[in-house]
Image: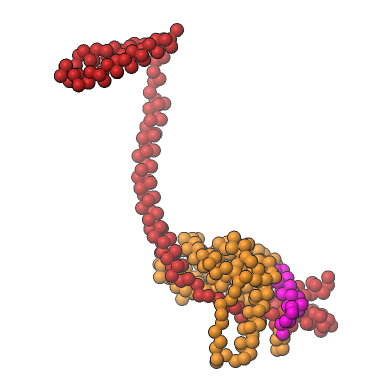
Amino acid sequence: MSDEDLARQSQGGDLVAFEELVRRYENRIYSFVYQSCGHDADAREVTQDTFARAFEAIAQFDPARPFASWLFTIARRKGIDCFRARIPGDGQAAPEEADPDDPAELLARREEARELWGRARQSLPESQFQALWLRYAEDMDLAQIGRVLGKTQTHVKVLLFRARHKLAAEWETAPRPLVLRTKGANL
Amino acid sequence: MKSWLAKFRISAALDAGKPLPESLRRAMAADPDLERFARRTQALGRALRNPPPSHPAPHEAIMRAVRAKAAARREQPRRASWAVWLAAPASVALLAVVCYWKVAPPPAPADGPSLAGAVQVLEMGETMSGAMPSAVMAPLTQEWARVDHDLQNTTQVLLASFP
């Protein structure tokens, strides 16, 4: 069943349907908030407030639109104070358990990504970081990102362009430069 | 500036998931910096698609908050109906008072300050103790004496306040 169908059921007061939505989105919302503000306790509180608010306002959700962008919009609004008070680079990723079945390439890529996101959190302004997160971690398109951030698609394109530009420049001047795997890039 | 614009167009085309236009491909072929930018943007994108893992979200706490909201929502109509039931008679009573105020003729103004009512009340205080049976009055003698005293003082004040 799609998110939008579950949301429609939730509009009729179905708490079980809403709990399914919570299961689908709780880790994604928590990660978005946690990566943006870098405080576990604050991120938990904002995540909780986000779903409570979503349940309260579910009647206002238009099932013709994607549920994800509606929910992330609430999360962003709920977390505004937390995002502004963020301490750059304070966010600690949870320790990753090594998977013996993972090929070395995958592990290297994960490590690379973790360092990249850490650097992004340190150096990018809030809106650029969130645009980048929604684009890559959430795989949202430009229209959805625009809806969440309350910006036009052109503005989102500029945010992403600047974010990547700055990130690449930061990385090249870093003490331990990232070896981005550019081989096989299909242009 | 031209290079910046070309890079922005490459970036936007990659974000939109569209193939690069032919003009951009030609520009990239002619400019190694643009070619490097496009490859680096794609590589960054691939690397960023693996977000770092984070702690699991607090499912139970979330659901507690949601259930609290659901309970509040169930409670709300009940409270609203009580409010309606209280508000309706209050509004009717207020309307009746306003109508009476508008329709009823105003009391005729007195020709001047009249002490008739006040004097009647004051005299009643004086005669009351004499009119009551002594069995009733006996335990209250002192209190009545104080009340009489107060009434007399009040009389003097009222009489003094009129010209």
Q: Main secondary structure of the magenta part?
A: helix
Residue A140 percent coordinates (x, y): 61, 73
Foreground of the two, A144 or B138: B138
Residue A115 percent coordinates (x, y): 66, 79
Q: From this viewpoint, which residue is outermost toward the top? A: B163
Residue B87 percent coordinates (x, y): 38, 42
Note whether B33 is above or below A17 in the view shown: below
Image-quadrant location for residue A16 = bottom left
Q: From this viewpoint, which residue is outermost toward the front? A: B142
Note whether B29 is above or below A85 in the view shown: below
Residue B27 percent coordinates (x, y): 82, 80
Question: For the point 53% across and 75% down, which residue is it?
Answer: B55
- Horizontal side of residue A64 vs A108, given as left or right: left
- Horizontal side of residue B112 vs A32, given as left or right: left
Q: Start and end of the magenta stretch?
A: A158-179
Residue B116 lies in the magenta stretch: no
Foreground of the two, B61 or B83: B61
Image-quadrant location for residue A151 = bottom right
Image-quadrant location for residue B135 = top left
Question: For the point 37% across and 38% down, which residue is it?
Answer: B90
Which chain wears red?
B
- Horizontal side of residue A130 vs B104, given as left or right: right
Residue A165 lies in the magenta stretch: yes
Which chain wears orange?
A
Dividing the image into 4 quarters, which one contains the C terminus of chain A?
A: bottom right
